Amino acid sequence: MGTRKSKAPPPAQARASMKKDLPEQFRDYRHVWVFMELERGHVHPVSFELLGEGRRLADQLGVQLAGIILGPPGDSTLHAAAEAFAYGADLVYLVEEPLLTDYRNEPFANALTDLVITHKPEILLLGATTLGRDLAGSVATTLLTGLTADCTGLDVDEDGSLAATRPTFGGSLLCTIYTLNCRPQMATVRPRVMRMPQRSNKPIGRVIRHDWRMLEEDIVTKVVGFLSDDRSGNANLAYADVVVAGGLGLSNAENLLLIKDLALTIGGDYGCSRPLVQKGWMPADRQIGQTGKTIRPKLYIAAGISGAVQHRVGVEGADLIVAINTDPHAPIFDFAHVGVVTDAVSFLPALTEAFTRRLAPANRLRLVN
Amino acid sequence: MHIVVCIKQVPDSAQIRVHPVTNTIMRQGVPTIINPYDLFALEQALQVRDHHGGEVTVLTMGPPMAEESLRKALTYGADRAILLTDRHFAGSDTLATSFALSQAIAKIGNSFGSPDIVFTGKQTIDGDTAQVGPGIAKRLDLVQLTYVAKVTSIDLRTRAITVERRSEGGTHVLKSELPCLITMLEGSNAIRRGSLDDALRAARSEIVKWNAVEAGIEDITKCGLRGSPTVVKRVFAPTPREQKAVQIDTVEKAVQDVANELVTSIFAHQPALEHELSSTRSVSR
């Protein structure tokens, strides 16, 4: 128990009360930092979501919020800085270096570690993307500090410590984790878990350029190429406004057509719960939940999904959750807004038809106008 | 070449249940499995060995019963299995875990030859952190290649390795050097069944067991709870929504009527959505 990558269960209370005064060398660590992830020149939306959270934490602590930008010299980093201010940052630490063009662990981990050692943040947040997790793991290990993965909730407790809540035991429970006696307190948060904050037209804040150098010859890994997902057209499930998903209640792989039909009818995207990926019925990038995608659509329809917590944490940000399941006691009815206790396989075609009829007159009207 | 694969024995999380009253995990009867992502790492390691020669050492840290997982790995064709087990490791977070594992890998290097590649799964299904791989790489000063979908080529003469690494919105092709640490993505390869020879050998094999001292760990305070900067303060079940779901009545109704009622209910909750759906629909068609 509690070995690789897992968190230990309860003896917790006793441990947390062991918290002593913060060691001398960490007492001047201040401010909340958000790592701004650049994806081929564009800021990943998770960075804005984190700035929203970071702003709240910084206000509670009465400290400043900084955006951290590592990238090549040019418009993309300056644009990212302006966006950081628009989403609430007070200042931006900027490292501009040509060898920070494409993400590679060695230079990014080196530069971020250097920034932390120089400017001493109290809290450092990163997106739980492939880039963020790769980077955060290295930086936390070098700094020998705590890192909490995939948080679903962040807060500051009475004594100013970061309380990071995340699903545990495959998502069956939630746990709140503290980093004691080490700084910074690091956490990663998945895209779409936190609400996108309002963008304001805040005047430009302070940009602090950080002088950092590394030689290309000292970096072992080279980027040889990039194959974009664009052609597959399924990279945007996390950002779809309407999502229909199926679970084991669909009985067989052929019935996934019912999900796709409904999704197409209402102009949405489709996905599934984990067991269907394990059965090979759908590719992993369509999996919704703790180990798959987190979604925040306006409408989410779950058909034949029982709703284990690992699924719940992936969908509870949806504005309206509709559950279709034969079992009236399925956990999904605890967090759905509208429920239908019925067999999804026989019900889905009727639902698709009902939507078609309801939406059709609007279309006709549009054509007339 | 020498390859080390780090695996973890995990409870099959799909089968874990939470006690409805006490909110504790009910572990009784929950089967344990090799972390599924680690199987992709093991398979990749075996393929590299089969192609380039050498041997594969499988390493796990855990309680004595984790031996089962190592024996299973031997039946798939691993050459050697090492269990790192010591009460001092209990309660390790990812930082403490990566410390213990990296010390053990260094010891493996001294005993059986320095590893050219350390493989592991992208994350475990119980912890889900994906932090231990990068932690081991940093502590051993290895190049880290995470979320690898495919090992494209390895040139032992020039010590060059090319991989495809999954990133946001696409796949990066990276060229790097051995030694390195690779974390493998799901679905990256099909797991072999293992031969009869391997099964017989696994049944006869001795699993090497190391405690902290035997793994060469001098500073035990870097392990277990004491070596973990993070602590779990509170474990709790998610709170049910205050309002239960509005149930659409299905009793003695035609399925189409129920469907119409559901659609009405959806748009009653989300009035703006109807117009939006109508327009996205006309665009998508």
Image (cartoon, helix red, strand yellow):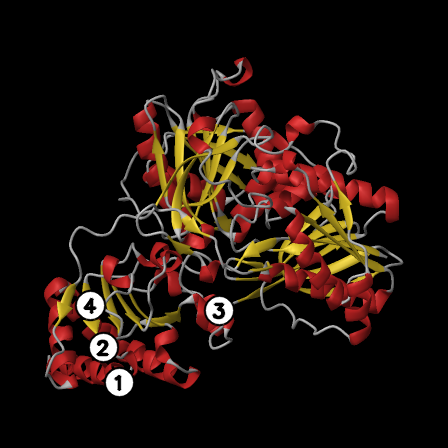
Q: Is residue B174 visible?
A: no
**Looking at the picture, do discs 4 and 1 lie on one chain?**
yes
User: What residue would you read off at disc 3?
Assistant: A230
The local crowd at label 4, few if under 14, some if 14 to 19, many if 20 or more residues have their Cα within 10 Å, is many
Of marks 3 and 2, which one's residue comes earlier in the chain? Answer: 3
For this orientation, the residue located farthest to the front is B28
Name the chain letter of the residue that bears numbered label 4.
A
The answer to whether the residues at label 3 and label 4 have Cβ atoms under 8 Å apart is no
Q: Please say if A50 is above or below B199.
A: above
A275 and B177: which is toward the camera: A275
The disc, 3 or 4, on the residue closer to the chain's N-terminal end is 3
Residue position for label 4: A339
Q: Residue at x 48, y 71 (%)?
A: A277
Q: Where does residue A340 sit, x and y in percent of width and height?
A: 19, 72
Asked if the residue at tag 2 contacts the one at tag 1, i.e. Cβ–Cβ closer than 8 Å, the answer is yes
The answer to whether residue A337 is left or right of residue B175 is left
Mark 2 and mark 4 in contact (Cβ < 8 Å)? no
Of tags 3 and 1, the one toward the viewer is 1
Q: Position of residue A250 (x, y in %)?
A: 36, 79
Asked which secondary structure carries label 4, the reply is strand
Q: Relative to B122, is A129 on the left or the right?
A: left
Which label is found at residue A346?
A: 1
User: Is disc 2 on the same chain as disc 3?
Assistant: yes
Q: Which residue is mark 2?
A: A342
Q: Position of residue B98 (x, y in %)?
A: 65, 40
Between disc 1 and disc 2, the foreground one is 2
Q: Quadrant of residue A363?
A: bottom left
- Badge 2 marks a residue whose secondary structure is loop
User: Looking at numbered disc 2 in the image, what kind of residue is underneath it?
Assistant: Thr
